[in-house]
Image: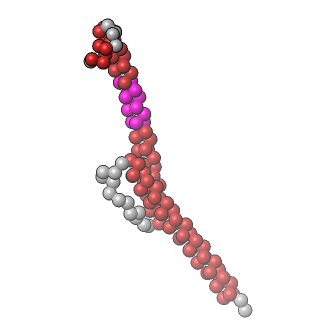
Amino acid sequence: ARVWQATGLPRELREEMLQGIRAEVVAICDRCLADHKAWVREQEVVIAERREQLAALEANLDETAELPDHSSATLVQVRADLDQAIEEMTQLQDRRRAEIADLSEGIAALGARLEEP
């Protein structure tokens, strides 16, 4: 209050300036809160999509991904954990595909040798 009085401005003008500053701060906070809420909604959508993608990989591979407990995790941590699990399951899927391709080639080669006179 003393700083404002030292400006030499009339009290009414000081009050009007303070109200203007308060209104600007509230508007900035409202925008930040709205931006944060939009970001949270976006993250929740991405997390739901990642969960679906992971569930499809698990079903396809007949495996269960190991995820940490997310009861107190942030959205960023949950998303990172899901991305890591998806990456690991995708790598497993790729390894299995390569193994199946190798086995198929081996079977085809064996079949060809068996048919030789």
Residue found at the very far left of the displayed protein:
1
Residue that appears at 60% across and 76% down: 102
How are the residues colored? secondary structure
Q: Find residue 19 and report its horizontal and vertical position in percent.
A: 33, 16
The furthest residue to the bottom: 117
Q: Nearer the viewer, residue 73 or 57?
A: 73
Q: Which residues are magenta?
A: 26-38
In this view of the protein, which residue sits in the foreground, 41 or 36? 36
Name the residue at 37% across, 24% down.
25
Magenta residues: mostly which secondary structure? helix
In this rendering, is residue 93 above or below 43?
A: below
| Residue 28 on the magenta span | yes
Q: Is residue 62 magenta?
A: no
Quadrant position of the C terminus in the picture = bottom right
Left or right, residue 32 beside residue 117:
left
Q: Height in image: 2 above or below 104?
A: above
Image point (35%, 24%), residue name: 26
Residue 11 visible (yes or no): yes
x, y (%) of residue 108?
65, 80
Image coords of residue 6 (percent x, y)? 31, 14
